[in-house]
Amino acid sequence: MADTAERVAVERVNAAFYEAFENADLDLMRDLWLDHEESLCVHPGALPVRGTPAINRSWALIMANTPYIQFFLTDVEVSVRDEVASVTCTENVLTADDRAGPDGFGGARAVATNVFVRTPDGWRLWIHHASPVLSGPDHD
Amino acid sequence: MADTAERVAVERVNAAFYEAFENADLDLMRDLWLDHEESLCVHPGALPVRGTPAINRSWALIMANTPYIQFFLTDVEVSVRDEVASVTCTENVLTADDRAGPDGFGGARAVATNVFVRTPDGWRLWIHHASPVLSGPDHD
């Protein structure tokens, strides 16, 4: 569908999104999103958050409450259609886990669909939908 | 962004998707999807299913194992960008629940992001991502 350079560009913006989260870089996170009232963000297990101001607030809250988080992305699949691109990936998440004490870490797995739109400034995130994986690894 | 007629058309295809599921109409379900190797379907709590053949099989399996299902959609929000449209909605689900005996019903709630692409035959489903809602109704 799209050439390799396109896919690489989309994958790079997708990686930047997770770096912004890992580094609690709210400015970068804000820049990566499409500034629009119809932008959409679904955090794992949560109801949708719509529109730039609400999405920015949700990230500020999450970052403030996440002492440590690291993502290992697997099954990254990029699909580009003219002005819109999607990335699906499995988020293998390592977090500091308060329940396990100050030195404890927790692991979790989620699936994310990230949809980007092409803008004069590059690809911007229009939709982020992440959901917890409840089934085993052998699900179809 | 888009005129009302466009939004109504997208909302209608979105409704048809849930009707196909409710009626276990695999032919309609198949017709509603974009026939493409990069089509993407995330069932609640599951890993992604990619490509038309695998997606069709997943629906056949789900329909075969769902004696009764009914959807009450709320918070339906449509966003149209040229050739791509997204619908977010809360799926309030009523199912026959075997655990509650032959007359039992169960309820659940999920959030879905459905992304459609414009084709000569109308809007077709490119991405369906549904996730269980684990938090309370007052989440931001």
Image (spheres, coloured by chain):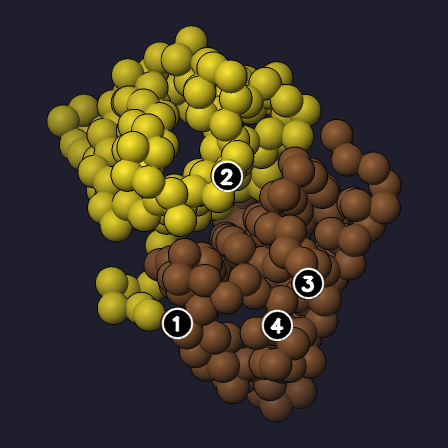
Chain colours: A brown, B yellow
* Chain of the residue where label 2 is placed in the rendered structure: B
Q: Residue at x 33, y 19 (%)?
A: B20
Distance from label 1 to label 4 (Cα)?
15 Å
Q: The disc labelled 4 sits on which kind of residue?
A: Asp
Q: Quadrant of the C terminus of chain B?
A: bottom left
Is the residue marked by circle 3 packed among few (<14), some (14-19), or many (20+) residues within 10 Å?
few
Residue A35 point in image, percent of width and height:
50, 66
Q: Find disc 1 in the rendering and name its residue.
A: A54
Residues at discs 1 and 4 both on one chain: yes
Q: Residue at x 52, y 22 (%)?
A: B119
Q: Find disc 2 in the rendering and name its residue.
A: B82
Q: The disc labelled 3 sits on which kind of residue?
A: Asp
Q: Does residue A69 appear in the picture of this structure?
A: no
Q: Are marks 2 and 4 in contact (CB under 8 Å)?
A: no
Q: Does residue B80 appear in the picture of this structure?
A: yes
* Chain of the residue where label 3 is placed in the rendered structure: A
Q: Is residue B19 left or right of residue A99?
A: left
Q: Are marks 4 and 3 in contact (CB under 8 Å)?
A: no
Residues at discs 2 and 4 both on one chain: no
Q: The disc labelled 1 sits on which kind of residue?
A: Ala
